[in-house]
Structure formats: structure tokens, C-alpha cells
Image: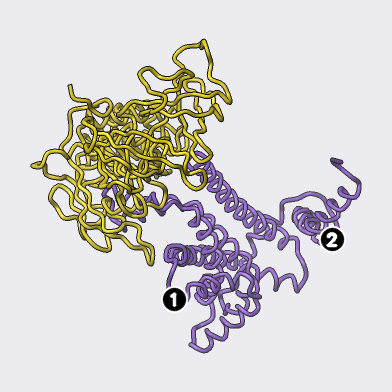
Chain colours: A purple, B yellow
Amino acid sequence: MKRTSWFNITSLVLGFSFLYLPILLLVIFSFNESRLVTVWGGFSTKWYSEMWQNQGLIDAAWVTLRVGLLSATIATVLGTMAALALSRHKRFAGRTLFSGMIYAPLVMPEVITGLSLLLLFVAIDFARGFWAVTLAHITFSMCFVAVVVQSRLVTFDRSLEEAASDLGCPPAKTFFVITLPVIAPAIIAGWMLAFTLSLDDLVIASFTSGPGATTLPMKIYSQVRLGVTPEINAVCTILLGLVTSGVLIASYLMRKEQQRSQFKSAAAP
Amino acid sequence: MAKTLGPVRREFAPWNDPDAVPYISFQNVTKRFGDFTAVNDLSLDIYEREFFALLGPSGCGKTTMMRMLAGFDAPSNGNVSLDGTDLTGIPPYKRPVNMMFQSYALFPHMSVEKNIAFGLKQERIANAEVKARVEEMLSLVKLEEFAKRKPHQLSGGQRQRVALARSLAKRPKVLLLDEPMGALDKKLREETQFELMDLQERLGMTFMIVTHDQEEAMTVADRIAVMDEGRIIQIATPTEIYEQPSSRYVADFIGDINLIEGRLTVLPEAEFADNLAIMQCPGIGSNSDVGLEIQVQCETTSDLAVGDRGWFAMRPEKIRLSHEVPEGLDPANPVNAVKGTIYDIAYLGDVSVFHVKINDDVIIRATQTNTTRLVERPLSWEDRVWLYWGADAGILLAS
């Protein structure tokens, strides 16, 4: 087999440049000495210290962090419960409908999710702001958690639970000392995913946010409309770092778990 | 001295004692899953300290029997009792039985010692005693050095022993073993079978094993129940199952056997003092007048009348082969002997398997132990040979 051809190398370089060059530029310019975004004025980290002076940005970051932690945690609990219900009870009325509806929000356009949530909050007269954004984020990230946890439960050996029961452990305790620890990597991966999604959501937050609950993506977007500053580049670089590590940790956990279960099934068919 | 069937492993046969009280009792148990009947109106008694095997092909209901005793499945009809207590409605975590799972079901996030201690920790047992019991179990299965390891750091055989130790730790009234050696290779399996037997005798516990491997069942068990389609076909000791099967199904399921269909011409005891029956075996289908006549010792079963269809069942290793007419045989009127042509030979090292063609319909398999390295006049393809056997080599079956 021919290992490299110029065509392959060219298409690879072009493709990856297209994907990552803009991001690379953003990271590079966050270390720019000059105030002008497009003119390189030497290396500096001053924007990273400068951004801490921008109270608006700090507030927005704080809101984002709180929304992320809260919504990811609640979404993980609900999503895990949904996944358990779907994989444990093979036959109940409307199971197909229910499992289809769990997946639907994954591909639902965010504008529609945001708009419908806005309509709901207006209809029930729920104040738009921090709690509305949190609820909205729970709604859409829950299904991601459910999908991740459910895929782990497919390979979960139910005889582990039977063994615990056989050894004298009642069902509720079995869930907490056996089931939960075994599927924990998938649950943590789900949480990471939910947190990351919440962190970088702009569209749904814009629909459901209110005064005093501006999230970081919203803040960045509104500032950029007035002109890109190197400060924003710095914030974005940090955000990028957070999101990337979140996704990496989640996929690492899932792969490790997969390897372990593969090893298990290979050794004991 | 009276002849017995095969070697006697130990003097233990409560099932022959009419006063013995069964320890585990299945009474008219039926289990249905939807339209499928897994266990069909089945009654079974198992005695204390017995090593009992449920043997059958997959889907015969043997695992369901075990799961009903463990409490994972409830009988649709009938009831299961243990040591005089009806188990109906008692959840698995309150039953004094423990199970060793086919997949071992070791808790992956716990070390070997934590796995073994798990059952003990569910009861209010002092930590010091738990620790002592775990150590005792670890030394019982010779895994002392592996106490801190996680299951995925162990080999298949070691995991199997952890699973065994875990299920024995609580000293259950009954230990259930679900295909315990399915994942081990042949050598390790044989070793483990003997270890399991010793362990059971030493601990004096009641063991119940589910397996589809007849060799495994015969090695370890005091009694075997052969199951098919939710029913028990025969319950007997391994030697009885092998030497005195109650039907063609059992005979064919356990080991290798020649089954020759025929018609009974002389009833046992009617004509012969030695309890013999004579069966005419015309073969099935064509050339039916080329009958081969076989004399069988018929001490068993069978309400056969003269003229009834029956099957003469004989194990291949009980047949001898010779080029010459066997001593004391009248070639014109052979008794327990028949002439044929060697059709196929398989040399397996310890034994050779011969397929001998009697006529177009009947091929008899005979195995010969290769007791010497050199043979003076070897049997070869197309040789005309006499097959002959003792009067107690075969058995006549009605069904």
C-alpha cells in the first residue's frame, strides 16, 4: 500500500487548516502585546491579567460557572434515571416513543429549543434569568447524559446485581454499592459533557436569560459586536482550554471503561 | 459376590433410605415465561451433603431450576422448600443459599478480599471475624497473595476461585454452581473438578451444579438428573446413568452408544435361566431378511412383550474385536456376537475407534484400548472381523 501521496497530504493540511487555523489565530493573538487585534506587536500575557479588571466579564464567568455546575449535576441525576428506566424496563407502554423522544433533542435546532422554552417561561410567568437559564440547560443536556449512561448500561452485567442480592444485599443498597460504582465512569463522562455544553451555549441562554444573568458566551458575543479586543481573545482561550479538557476527560473515561468491559468479556465468555 | 455397576466412590446413598428426609424439595414445580414452559410439573428431592448435578442441553430448564432455588425466579406453580422451610415469597437476599455465577459476577471495583467479605458484611458480623473468615477462604482456594488485587488483574482460573470463595464465605446451606467451569480450558477444568469434589466432602455441604458437560457431571456428582424440555428424564448415580440408562435419550446424551432397533423374540426368563432376552434385529428398511440375532441380558425396565419394538444399547468400549471366531462361539448360531467388515478406523492414541459395517443399515462402533505399543496382527480396513461382547455388556430399552 502506498503510504503517502501528495494528494492526501494536501487535503489533510487544507482540511485541518480550515478547521483549526481560526482557533489557532485566536490563541496566538491572545498573547499579542498590541491593542490592535490584527497587528502583531510582540509576545505578552498582559491581557490575561487585564481581563480580571473587567468586572462585567468576571460576573458573566461566575454566572456561567454556577449555571454549568448546577445544570450539569441535575441533568446527570435525571439523565441517569432516564437511562436506567429505559434499559431496565424492556416492556412498558410507550417505551419506543419515550426512547425516541430522549434522542430527539440531540438533533433539535437550538433556536427551536430556546424559543419554545422562552414561550413556556412566558406562559407560566416564570422570571427569565439565572434559574430559567439553568432549567433550560438541564433540559437539553439531560438527554446527552441519558445517551452516554444508557450505552454503558447495555454492557452492564446484571448478574453483578444478582450476585449482590444472593449474598444478602437488599435491592436499594445494591444499587448504591454495586450498580452506581460500576457505571460511575459513564456518569462522570455524562456530567462532563453536560457541563461543557452548558459552558459554551449561546443560543438557548440568549432566549432564556434576563437582567443580571448574562453568561460568558453572551457577554463575549455582545462585546465582539463593539469590536474584538485582545482581552476577549484571552477569555476565549481559557474557555477553549476548559471545554477541550472537559471533552478529553469525558472521552478518556468512556474509552477506559470500554477497554475494561472488553477485557472482561474476552476473559469470561 | 454380587456384581455392581462400576466403582463405588463413597458409601453415601440417602436416596435409597426410605426414612431419609429430603433437604431440598421441588414439589410439582412449573415455570412459564410467557408461552414458553421452562420447567414442567417437576418434582425432585435432594438430600443433605449430596453433590447433585442437573444435566441437559441448553434450554432444558436446568438453570431455571437453580434460579428458583436461589430466588431469582418464582415458580408459576408448585413450591420449593429447603430444610423444611417453604421458600415461597422469600427474596434472594434472605435465602440461606449462595450461588456461583457462570460469569463469576465478581464486583470489578472491589479487591479480591472485599469481594469475599461482601456477603459477610451484609450481616452484623464483627470486623475481626469477617477478616478471619476472609483469610480462611483465601487459604482454602490458595489465593492469599492475591488478596489486594482487582478481578481484572487475575487470570481466568484465579477469578473462578475467587467466585467460589465468595459464595462459600457465608457457609450457605446449599451452594449452587451455574456452569462453574465453562470458561476454563480442559486441563484446568479437570483439576478444578477434583478440587471441587474434595472441597465438598471436606466441608460437608450440599452442592448443586448445573452443567451441560456430561463428563463434568459424572466426575463431581453423587447423583445426576438428566433433563430435557423442562422434565427430568432420569435421576440416578453416574454409574447407573451410564450403565443403566432408562431411555434412548439418556443413553445417547451420556457418552457414545450403539443403538440397534429390533423386535423382541424371546422374553427374559421365559426360556433362559440366565435372564436373557433374544432380539431379532432385521435392520430398518431394505434387506430386512438379513436379520442379525442378538442375545441381551435384560435385567432392567422395559415392559416389553414378545413382538414389541425395542432398542439394544451397547457402549463401544464393551465390544471386542477379533479376526478369529471367539472361543466357545458357535459360528452357525452366534450368541452375543456378530460378523462385520471394518469400514473406518480412527486412531486416537489411547484408544482406537472402529466402525464396523454389519449390513447396509447397521454400523457398530467399537473402541479398543491400545494396551501395547506393538500389535502382531493389526486390524485394518475391509477386514472381516467378529464383534463379540459379554452377556452384561448391553441393555434392552423400550423407549
Q: Position of residue B48 (x, y in %)?
A: 17, 39
Q: Is residue B322 above or below residue B222?
A: above
Picture disc at residue B330: none
Q: Is residue B155 visible?
A: yes
Q: Position of residue B33 (x, y in %)?
A: 36, 63
Element carrying mark 2:
loop
Q: Nearer the viewer, residue B270 or B310?
A: B270
Element carrying mark 1:
loop
What's under tag 1, amino acid-wise? Ala
Q: Is residue B257 above or below residue A23?
A: above
| Chain designation of label 1 | A
Residue placed furthest toward the bottom: A123
Q: Which residue is mark 1?
A: A93
Q: Is residue B120 visible?
A: no
Q: Nearer the viewer, residue B87 or B272?
A: B272
Which image quadrant is residue B134 in?
top left
Q: Is residue A47 above or below residue B260?
A: below
Residue placed furthest toward the right: A6
Q: Nearer the viewer, residue A176 or A23?
A: A176
Picture disc at residue A38: 2
Q: Position of residue B297 (x, y in %)?
A: 28, 33
Total number of numbered discs in the rendering: 2
Q: Residues within 10 Å of mark 1 (few under 14, many from 20)?
A: few
Residue at 71% across, 71% down: A223
